[in-house]
Amino acid sequence: MQLTTFTDYCLRVLLYVAAQPERRATISEIARSYGISEHHLTKVVHLLGKAGLLLNVRGHGGGITLARPAERIGVGDVVRLAEGEPQLAACFDAAAPRCVIAPACRLKGVLQEAADAFYAALDGHTVADLVAQPGALRTILLSPRSNSARPPSAANKRGLRPRAISKRP
């Protein structure tokens, strides 16, 4: 199962804010730190705020903080919020045409079992578990190298740094 970039960004925002619970963070500093688009993070922060995971304060001195302790924010809950119900195959979609082998097929049950195991593993962890070493995380997130990172190109959907392209004669 592969998570969407949106879900990745939701988790990154929560990690960033949880690593520095004593202060408000801004979307622009989070975007700089991770080298991702402020526009995308605005949507992420809006969703997390609506879901009651972030407190979003506007205006001078504003920013974002966790709305509740990191120990009470389950990783599985965040992934479910961002991803919605998993559609592992067409047979999970009620609107899809009925599969001809559905009466005898066991694949849907096996896939559901795998999805349940995936979420059970995520449900065993909180955002606090992910920032168990906030000092180390802060050092990485606030380092000059991460603050000078450029947002990835639109073609680079996974948030990875683009490779340098050598010029050939």
Image: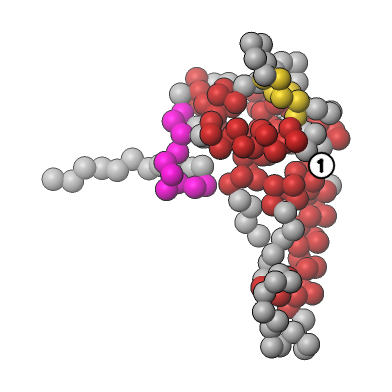
Asked whether residue 15 is drawn in magenta, I would say no
Q: Residue at x 80, y 68 (%)?
A: 113
Nearer to the camera, 131 or 136: 131
Instruction: Please report the residue visible at 29 percent of the width from the left and 43 percent of the height from the top.
Output: 165
Disc 1 element: loop
- The reply to whether residue 128 is in sight is no
Give x and y (percent) for residue 50: 75, 36
Q: Is residue 110 above or below residue 2?
A: below
User: Residue 30 sits in which quadrant?
Assistant: top right
In depth, the one of 110 and 10 nearer the eye is: 10
Find disc 1 in the rendering and name its residue. Answer: 74
Crowd band around label 1 with a 10 angstrom C-alpha radius: few (<14), some (14–19), many (20+): some
* Numbered-mark total: 1
Please say whether residue 90 is visible from this viewpoint. Answer: yes
Q: Residue at x 74, y 84 (%)?
A: 102
Classify residue 169 by image quadrant.
Answer: top left
Q: Position of residue 82 (x, y in %)?
A: 70, 47
Stretch in magenta: 149-158
